[in-house]
């Protein structure tokens, strides 16, 4: 809504005011990080600001609104900056910030938590490849992997399946669920190793790593060579409240995805060729120990 009634007399009027305020805050700033001089309908922005914000003895309506708009944009840009060290390393600082501003203009914050802010980056990169060219394919893989870290960090968890429950069940009838925080990624680049090289604080570690956490957070990503194309299968998960990634064999990833899609254990395993039964048993044992397998939702 572009214009407001002279006085707020109803809930509907209040909603209109809230929408106008949100629209004003979420409009991209100028290159000098200032409010734009014109509103969407061409009116002077100073007149629009004066229509719903009072001045005080130090600041005009425009200046007061500008403070809020800059706080909104700087806070969200800072969050994306901190959440996407790998994407920054791929694109470089300046290109990343241009991407971040375009992303927020199209996808302003709609959630009560800033945790969800990067959740649509992958789709945005696919729709706007020019913003990450010539490294779009790599940027998409990195965005997927970094979002999987967020999901693994604080995603919901279900009660894990006990080993005896799996051993006693009929594979032809048993349908399993996967933990909601578990992400299975087929990547065209080894971005797991790449992001580990970029990050300095040890917040994400390989399964064999015992590097202690608590190192100071690095504000700026190190210069790490971009990885070359390589097909890898990776599970991003948590264990004992710590983030991990785990490389998977292609067949293991296919089995897990089939289980997640609702196939029985027997149906998930049947198409696998060239893998010894003992290896498949070892995979299930490992997945159970890691707590990845759980009862299927609704059962």
Image (cartoon, rainbow, N blue to C red):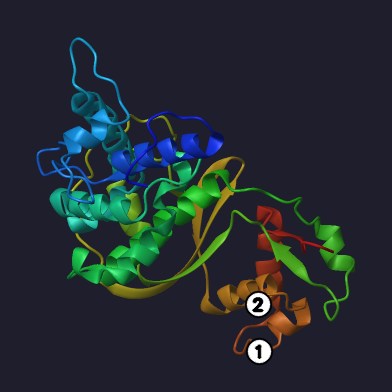
Who comes first in sequence, dot 1 or dot 2? Answer: 2
Q: Which residue is mark 1?
A: 271
* Residue 183 image point, x, y percent: 54, 61
Residue in view at x 76 percent, y 50 percent: 159
Which is more foreground, mark 1 or mark 2? 2
* Residue 248 image point, x, y percent: 52, 69
Residue in view at x 77 percent, y 78 percent: 264
Left/right of residue 94 with respect to residue 153 in the rendered view: left
Q: Which residue is mark 2?
A: 258
The residue furthest front is 6
* Residue 259 image point, x, y percent: 69, 73
Name the foreground residue: 245 vs 259: 259
Relative to 45, residue 195 above or below = below
Relative to 220, residue 196 above or below = below
Residue in view at x 31 percent, y 57 percent: 194
Name the foreground residue: 202 vs 39: 39
The residue carrying pointer 1 sits among few (fewer than 14), some (14 to 19) or many (20 or more) residues within 10 Å by Cα, namely few
> Image quadrant for the C terminus?
bottom right
The residue carrying pointer 2 sits among few (fewer than 14), some (14 to 19) or many (20 or more) residues within 10 Å by Cα, namely some
Q: Secondary structure at mark 2?
A: helix
Relative to 245, residue 256 above or below = below
* Residue 23 image point, x, y percent: 34, 44
Determine contact: label 1, label 2, CB under 8 Å: yes
Relative to 128, residue 3 above or below = above
Residue in view at x 15 percent, y 37 percent: 33
Does residue 208 show up? no
């Amino acid at each position: 809504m572009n214009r407001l009634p002279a006085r707020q007399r109803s809930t509907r009027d209040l909603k209109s005011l809230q929408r106008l305020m949100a629209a004003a805050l979420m409009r991209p700033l100028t290159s000098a990080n200032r409010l734009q001089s014109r509103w969407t309908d061409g009116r002077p922005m100073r007149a629009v600001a004066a229509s719903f914000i009072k001045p005080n003895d130090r600041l005009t309506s425009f200046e007061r609104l500008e403070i809020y708009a800059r706080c909104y944009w700087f806070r969200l840009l800072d969050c994306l900056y901190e959440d996407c060290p790998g994407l920054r390393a791929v694109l470089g600082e300046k290109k990343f910030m241009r991407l971040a501003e375009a992303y927020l203009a199209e996808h302003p914050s709609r959630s009560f938590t800033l945790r969800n802010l990067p959740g649509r980056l992958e789709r945005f990169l696919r729709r706007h490849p020019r913003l990450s060219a010539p490294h779009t394919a790599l940027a998409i893989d990195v965005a997927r992997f970094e979002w999987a870290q967020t999901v693994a960090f604080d995603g919901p968890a279900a009660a894990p399946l006990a080993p005896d429950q799996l051993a006693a069940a009929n594979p032809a009838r048993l349908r399993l669920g996967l933990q909601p925080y578990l992400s299975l990624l087929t990547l065209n680049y080894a971005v797991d190793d790449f992001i580990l090289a970029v990050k300095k604080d040890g917040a994400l570690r390989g399964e064999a790593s015992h590097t202690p956490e608590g190192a100071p957070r690095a504000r700026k990503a190190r210069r790490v060579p971009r990885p070359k194309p390589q097909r890898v299968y990776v599970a991003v998960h948590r264990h004992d409240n710590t983030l991990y990634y785990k490389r998977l064999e292609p067949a293991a990833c296919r089995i897990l995805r089939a289980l997640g899609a609702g196939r029985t254990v027997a149906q998930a395993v049947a198409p696998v060729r060239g893998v010894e039964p003992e290896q498949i048993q070892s995979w299930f044992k490992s997945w159970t120990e890691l707590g990845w397998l759980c009862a299927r939702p609704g059962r």
